[in-house]
Amino acid sequence: MEQLLDLSVIASPLLYSFYVLSVLAALFLVLRAGLRPRPAGRVEASALEGSGSPSRISQLPGWRIWLATAAVATACGALTGAVVLFVSEVLLNVFGLPLDADTRIWVICAFAGLGLAAVNLWRSRWWRKAVAVLACLLFIATAALGINAGYGLNPTLGAMLGLSQIKHLALPKLFHPHQPKTGSALWRGWKPPAGMPSAGRSGAVTIPADASGFHARDAFLYLPPAALVDHPPALPIIVMMMGQPGGPEQSKSAVHELDALARQNHGLAPLLLTVDQLGNPYRNPVCVDSVKGNVYTYVTTDVVNFIRKNLNVAPDRSQWAVAGYSNGGECALSFAAKRPEIFGSLLDISGELEPVNGSAENTVKTIFGGNESAFTAEKPATILKAHTYSDELAIFTSGSRDSRYGPQSAEAAADAKAAGMTTHRFVGAGIGHRGDALGYGLKSGLPLLFQRFFLARP
């Protein structure tokens, strides 16, 4: 089972195998000799109706009747898919943002295939019915794999199904080295010891929710090579949150980027702790304390206490950053704005502008108990306008093709700059709101954080 859940679902051989099988299944369902012959008695009965001549449809060859039937069924299935998309995207705003064109195509194609399979259940032999049922499962699986590969955030079957197979990470022994003077360059005095691993280590960790009581999934921790030696230096840390739906292990792409930067800087890199601000990939309590969960207390108290008690990190705020993607980006912006004494830096990757669950109206009703003023008070723009910041680095990234969160990211950057933060804004050409946005944000923001943490030569 573990090997099955670790199966890569974005590898080209697997994807193309499903694509080919789906096309072959569709061809099989279309290429049918004709409907089973109608009993002679029924044909004669139809000939006696009306004017006494056979009905028009009974005069058509069987294959023409079948092709017309299959075409109508396929079209009805595709139309059903389009209606489902309209209701989900426009009326209910289930996804919180417009879907990309390829996602819509996958959904419509899947429903079209279901329509074609359904009509094969009518007046057919048992084995064709069995193939039609299997084809339904195949069409759904192919669409799901295609959509997942397009977004590029769930690399394995386990991640795609929300069944994490990440093993727990054994934490290094807590070591209290002499703390370098604030602002001193760690890269200047660091000499990697013999036997230091060439790459970092990552895995799951459980964070007790003693203060918040929030039911979070296990966090995902990355330890750079310099953190794995016998006497590690006090390293910086990045607390990160992913989007919705999603989970901490989706930050695996950050591990590759951090390992690459660590190789360039003699094993030095910040620790990365990706925490769960959702509790469940299909719910969004937003990053406040409410009846839906005390997310704010969980991150700013429980997570912070866990770090200080268990990890070899530098205590100074300038060595702490909070980061997030999409839903997690808004959370990161909110926490950085509220708690600058904890987080001296912010990386907001294609983040939302407001703490919303679906629509603003739904959020006020379900999260804030109908209190519009409480909702307004939790908006990052409101928090930023009430403060003046100094020595706060804020990095905002988004894609040029992200028509929804690109403008929101620009507005958030402007608000942060007006409040006194040192801001950097990056827009990736041809980047949308999917895995490419996360990758672009990490590549753009992490080098700046390395400079901020004095881990890299200027």
Image (cartoon, rainbow, N blue to C red):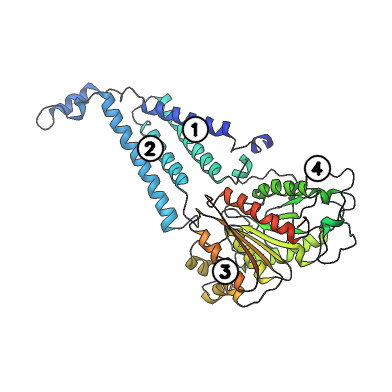
Name the amino acid type tagged 1: Tyr
Determine if residue 252 is in view: yes
The answer for how far apart the CA atoms under marks 3 and 4 are is 40 Å
Displayed quadrant of residue 62:
top left
Q: Is tag 4's residue or tag 2's residue first in the polypeptide sequence?
A: 2
Which residue carries the number 4 mark? 198
| Disc marking residue 115 | 2
Left or right of 123? Residue 435 is right
Q: Is tag 1's residue or tag 3's residue first in the polypeptide sequence?
A: 1
The answer for how far apart the CA atoms under marks 1 and 3 are is 45 Å
Secondary structure at numbered mark 3: helix
Displayed quadrant of residue 284:
bottom right
Which label lies toward us, 3 or 4?
A: 3
Residue at the (45%, 42%) spot, across then down: 106
| Disc marking residue 19 | 1
Q: Is tag 3's residue or tag 4's residue first in the polypeptide sequence?
A: 4
Near mark 4 (Cα within 10 A), the count class, few <14, some 14-19 or many ≥20, is: some
Determine if residue 38 is in view: no
Looking at the picture, does residue 358 appear above or below residue 262? below
| Disc marking residue 414 | 3
Name the amino acid type tagged 4: Ser
The answer for how far apart the CA atoms under marks 1 and 2 are is 18 Å
Nearer-the-camera pick, 160 or 325: 325
The answer for how far apart the CA atoms under marks 4 and 2 are is 53 Å
Residue 409 location (% of width, % of height): 55, 62
